[in-house]
């Protein structure tokens, strides 16, 4: 199993290292990655998320509702807790806190979901469906929350909006929904619910973009990290422990409370036990927000999940 985990993590480290090396060697300007960021956030990732959600049968999504409930509750609980601590206890800016909490709360479903779940439960349509539903859950129900905070602070900094967060909510929600990274998966879910089958020609046309999404995002993350210095502090340690241990145990507790068992229970815990995702770091860069804490958590959790994943694979063996 350790080999399977290392095998799944290898592409992440290799591609991130290539991006890191390209930035350090000045092959890529690591101080100005806006062009690459636009490609990742406005084209590649939206295409990948749209393809994953629009091809997921609505009946399959409904059947996976227990998984959606566990993932959503777990991610929101962790997001709220880390955001509160970051802002109120550690006095981080709302933008920095939003990027950090998205990094902590949203696991790396896209890169690690299928390899890990396939190794434990076996590869098949049900496994692929679970991963697709997890990706849709994170992209539709989690990323807009981070976007709302970033858009709110951007509007306040520009002096365009000075009212309360509640008064700004409709405008901020509209701005967030218009973002391709949210609109792509949301449109996919809506079309799936309506029973609309996308023509194969359309799916084939955007498939190359989708295939490039994860690699481009990881490469971009490496380039971004090449311009930073890894700093370990209390926030980083707490956040890393949360994403690697506390969050999966929260999911495990919710699974037990709901009386779930079998494949859906195993899937829920293992998907949450994956390392931190790259969405937060990439989102922050898109808004000009640098979060060294989020970057450190991303690196640490990606390395140490080699140790924590076997723990939760063992804990879920009897479910």
Image (cartoon, rainbow, N blue to C red):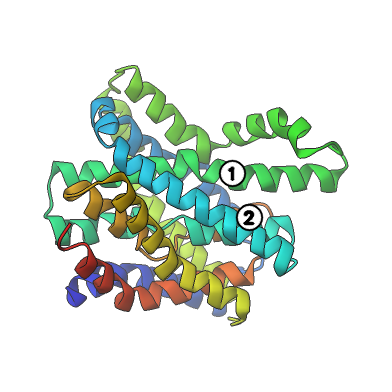
Residue at image position (29%, 52%) is: 256
Quadrant of the drawing holding the C terminus: bottom left
The tag on residue 101 is none
**Where residue 283 appears, x then y in whole percent?**
58, 53
- Which residue does the numbered mark 2 point to in the structure image? 98
Q: Is residue 18 left or right of residue 7?
A: right
Residue visible at 48% across and 78% down in the picture = 21
- Give residue 8's quadrant in the image: bottom left
Q: Identify the residue at horizontal 49%, vertical 57% (top origin).
A: 105
Q: Is residue 14 left or right of residue 171?
A: left
Q: Quadrant of residue 195?
A: top left
Is the C-beta separation of discs 2 and 1 under 8 Å?
A: yes
Q: Residues within 10 Å of mark 2 (few under 14, many from 20)?
A: many
Residue 143 sits above or below residue 108 on the image = above
Estimate the x, y position of residue 158 in percent, counting from the top left: 84, 44
Residue 71 appears in the picture as rendered: yes
Residue visible at 27% across and 37% down in the picture: 64
C-alpha separation, residue under disc 2 versus residue under disc 1: 8 Å
- Disc 2 element: helix
Give the left or right position of residue 66, taking residue 86 as reference: left
Q: Nearer the viewer, residue 286 or 104?
A: 104
Q: Earlier in the sequence, mark 2 or mark 1?
A: 2
Q: Give the class, few, some or many, for how many residues have Cα within 10 Å of label 1's Cα (few <14, many ≥20).
A: some
Does the rendering let one see residue 282?
no
Secondary structure of the residue carrying tag 1 is helix
Splitting the image into 4 quarters, where does residue 118 fall? bottom left
Q: Give me the disc on residue 145.
A: 1
Q: How many marks?
A: 2
Where does residue 41 sit, x and y in percent of width and height? Answer: 52, 47
Q: Is residue 125 above or below residue 270?
A: above
Which residue occupies the foreground of this view, 109 or 248?
A: 248
């Amino acid at each position: 199993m350790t080999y399977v985990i290392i095998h799944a993590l290898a592409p992440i480290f290799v591609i991130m290292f290539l991006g890191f090396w390209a930035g350090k060697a000045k092959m890529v300007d690591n101080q100005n990655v806006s062009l690459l960021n636009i490609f990742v956030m406005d084209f590649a990732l939206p295409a990948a998320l749209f393809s994953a959600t629009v091809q997921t049968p609505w009946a399959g999504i409904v059947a996976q509702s227990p998984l959606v409930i566990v993932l959503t509750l777990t991610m929101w609980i962790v997001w709220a807790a880390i955001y509160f601590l970051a802002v109120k206890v550690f006095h981080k800016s709302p933008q920095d806190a939003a990027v950090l909490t998205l990094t902590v709360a949203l696991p790396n479903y896209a890169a690690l979901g299928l390899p890990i779940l396939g190794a434990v439960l076996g590869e098949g349509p049900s496994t692929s469906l679970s991963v697709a539903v997890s990706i849709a859950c994170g992209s539709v129900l989690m990323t807009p929350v981070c976007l709302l905070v970033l858009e709110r602070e951007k509007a306040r900094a520009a002096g365009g909006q000075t009212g309360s967060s509640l008064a700004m909510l409709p405008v901020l929600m509209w701005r967030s929904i218009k973002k391709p990274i949210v609109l792509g998966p949301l449109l996919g879910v809506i079309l799936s619910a309506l029973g609309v089958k996308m023509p194969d020609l359309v799916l084939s046309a955007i498939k190359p973009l989708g295939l490039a999404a994860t690699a481009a995002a990881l490469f971009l993350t490496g380039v971004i990290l090449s311009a930073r210095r890894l700093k370990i502090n209390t926030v980083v340690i707490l956040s890393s422990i949360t994403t690697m241990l506390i969050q999966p145990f929260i999911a495990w507790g919710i699974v037990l409370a709901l009386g779930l068992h079998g494949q859906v229970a195993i899937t829920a815990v293992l998907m949450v036990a994956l390392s931190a995702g790259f969405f937060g770091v990439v989102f922050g860069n898109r808004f000009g927000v640098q979060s060294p804490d989020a970057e450190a958590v991303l690196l640490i959790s990606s390395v140490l999940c080699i140790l924590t994943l076997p723990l939760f694979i063992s804990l879920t063996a009897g479910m």
